[in-house]
Amino acid sequence: LIRAEGIWAGCIASVERELESMWDEAHRTGELSSEQRVRLFTANAAANEHAVAIINDMCAITGTAAMHRAHPLSRCRRDSQSLQGHISTNGSAIEKAAKIRLGLLDADRLV
């Protein structure tokens, strides 16, 4: 449980740092660079992946109780698995962000 809490706290800190950096850049220059967009996307994608793993770990800790449809972890697990496939953080979005970071694709406002 402590490990999971630490991972989640790290994810929150990473996303918050990039949001602060994004705000500073937008305030300073009036726009966002593709590098900043990709950094925020990267933090969000990592937080999403870790959230799914943490919920799965919590379900493993609680055992079969989490399998009951009305159990809060059961709902969290279904929601987190749905989020994995969401267009904002799915494999295609990750591939697009990686290509932008590597200079193989032009910057895109959707990343």
Image (cartoon, rainbow, N blue to C red):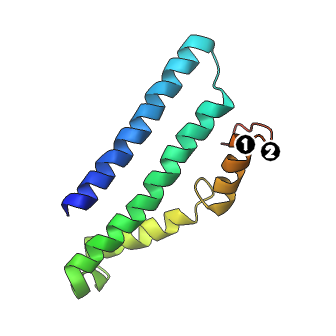
Mark 1 residue crowding within 10 angstroms, few (<14) / some (14–19) / many (20+): some
Quarter residue 75 falls in: bottom left
Check residue 100 in the rendering and tell me which mark sits there, or answer none.
Answer: 1
Q: Nearer the viewer, residue 82 or 37?
A: 37
Name the residue at 50% across, 62% down: 83
Quarter residue 95 falls in: bottom right
Under mark 2, the amino acid is Leu
Using residue 34 as the reference point, say whether residue 50 is left or right of it.
left
Q: Nearer the viewer, residue 6 or 86?
A: 6
Check residue 47 in the rendering and tell me which mark sits there, or answer none.
Answer: none
Instruction: Give the SS element for disc 2.
Output: loop
Quarter residue 16 falls in: top left
Query: Whole-percent x and y of residue 93?
Result: 66, 54
Query: Whole-percent x and y of residue 61?
Result: 22, 77
Q: Determine contact: label 1, label 2, CB under 8 Å.
A: yes
Q: Extreme bottom residue here? A: 64
Residue 14 drawn above or below residue 6: above
Query: Whole-percent x and y of residue 52?
Result: 41, 65
Using residue 16 as the reference point, say whether residue 30 is left or right of it.
right
Residue assigned mark 2: 104
Name the residue at 20% across, 64% down: 1
Name the residue at 64% across, 54% down: 94
Mark 2 residue crowding within 10 angstroms, few (<14) / some (14–19) / many (20+): few
Residue 87 drawn above or below residue 81: above
Using residue 7 as the reference point, say whether residue 107 is left or right of it.
right
Under mark 1, the amino acid is Ile
